[in-house]
Amino acid sequence: MRNVLIAAGAVLALAAGGCDAAMETKTDAAAAVDGVQFDQALHDKLPQAIRDRGTVRFVTDASYPPMEQFAADGRTIVGFEPDLADALGKVLGVKFEMVTGAFQTAIDKVAAGEYDGVMSAVTDTPEREKKADFVDYFSAGTSILVQKGNPRHVAELTNLCGQPVAIERGTVQADLLHRSQSICGGDPIKIDEYKTNADALLQLRTGRAVAVLNDYPAASFLASDSRTSNYYQLASPAQYEPGYIGIPFAKSNGQLRDAVKAALDKLIAAGAYDDLLQRWGLTSGAVKTAIVNGAKQD
C-alpha cells in the first residue's frame, strides 16, 4: 500500500462517507451476484497465461467512493468497481484482484504489462485510447464540489476564476480546468494538483480550496451521504463533458478485452449489473451494452 494512502487514511474515512457501511453494502452486493453463472466458453477465450495464473490484476487508486475506497481495515477495497470485478470473475472463472497504485501512471503500467487493466473510474478519451483499449461500462460527466453552504457562491466554471481549486493530477477534470483558463482572462484559476482525490478533498474540507472537480457519481455521493454531507455539496446540478468510464487494457491484449466485454454483456443481460448500480446509487450512469473504445471524438 502506498505511503500516501496510509497517511491519508483518516481523511479518506471522512471522504468516503463511512467505511463500515461500505463493507455492509459490499456484502449485500456480493449476494446480488450469487446467481451469476460461470461461462466455460468465455473462460476458454481468456489468454492462456491468465487461465494458468487464475487471476486478473487491476490497478486502482482507492480514493474515489462510491467507485472504490478502503474499508475500515485499511486494506480491503470496496465499492461498485470491486463488486463489478467480483461479478466479472464469477462469469469468467478467475479471480479479479484490485491492487493499489498511482492513477497518473496506471495506463502506462498496463501498457507495459505490469497489470492486466485499470479499474479506477477511468474516463475513456481519444488521447487515452492511443495507449489502451477500453471496455466502457458507465456514463458520467464532471461536477463541481464545494464546501457545505457554498460560501463562495460557486455555480459554474467561470466562478472559479481567480480562486484556488484542488484536483487529482492526471484526471480529465484536471484537463478541463486547464482548458477553462481561457474563460478567465487575466484572472486565472489557481489550480493545485494532488496525487490522490483524498488529498484534494482535504484542501476543500479545510478551506484551502473553494472547489474540487469530480466525476458526478463521486461528487454526488459526498454531497448526499449523511457522513459527508456536512462538509460538501454540489455547486449545481450541471455535469460538464459527459462521457464513458471504462477499463483500459493493453492494446496487445485483445483476448482479455473481448472476454471481459462479453462477460460484462452477460451481467447486463442477467440484471446483475443493474442490481450493483442500484446498491451503490449509480443507476443514472447505466449503459445498455458494453462498449469498446467509446470515447467521444473532438
Image (tube, helix red, strand yellow):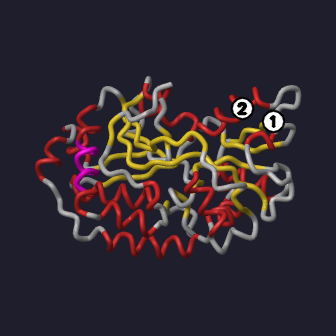
Residue 179 drawn in magenta:
no
Q: Nearer the viewer, mark 2 or mark 1?
A: 2
Q: Earlier in the sequence, mark 2 or mark 1?
A: 2
Q: Is residue 149 left or right of residue 95?
A: right
**Residue drawn 29% across the image and 38% down it:** 257
Q: Which mark is residue 189?
A: 1
| Residue type pointed to by label 1 | Ile
User: In the image, residue 272 lies at what x, y percent?
Assistant: 30, 64
Q: Nearer the viewer, residue 130 or 177?
A: 177
User: In the image, residue 295 lies at what x, y percent?
Assistant: 44, 33
Q: Is residue 41 left or right of residue 74?
A: left
| Residue type pointed to by label 2 | Ser
Q: Is residue 249 left or right of residue 216?
A: left
Identify the secondary structure beneath mark 2.
Answer: helix
Q: Residues within 10 Å of mark 2 (few under 14, many from 20)?
A: some
Separation of disc 2 and disc 1 at Cα? Answer: 8 Å
Q: Residues within 10 Å of mark 1 (few under 14, many from 20)?
A: many
Residue 260 drawn in magenta:
yes
**Residue drawn 56% across the image and 51% down it:** 1
* Prevalent SS, magenta region: helix
* Badge 2 vs badge 1, beta-carbon distance below 8 Å: yes
Q: Which mark is residue 280?
A: none
Identify the secondary structure beneath mark 1.
Answer: loop
Compared with residue 114, is residue 85 higher up or lower down, i.e. above or below?
A: below
Residue that carries the numbered disc 2 in the rendered image: 180
**Residue drawn 72% across the image and 49% down it:** 212
**Residue drawn 23% across the image and 35% down it:** 255
User: In the image, residue 178 lies at what x, y percent?
Assistant: 71, 30
**What range is drawn magenta here?**
259-266
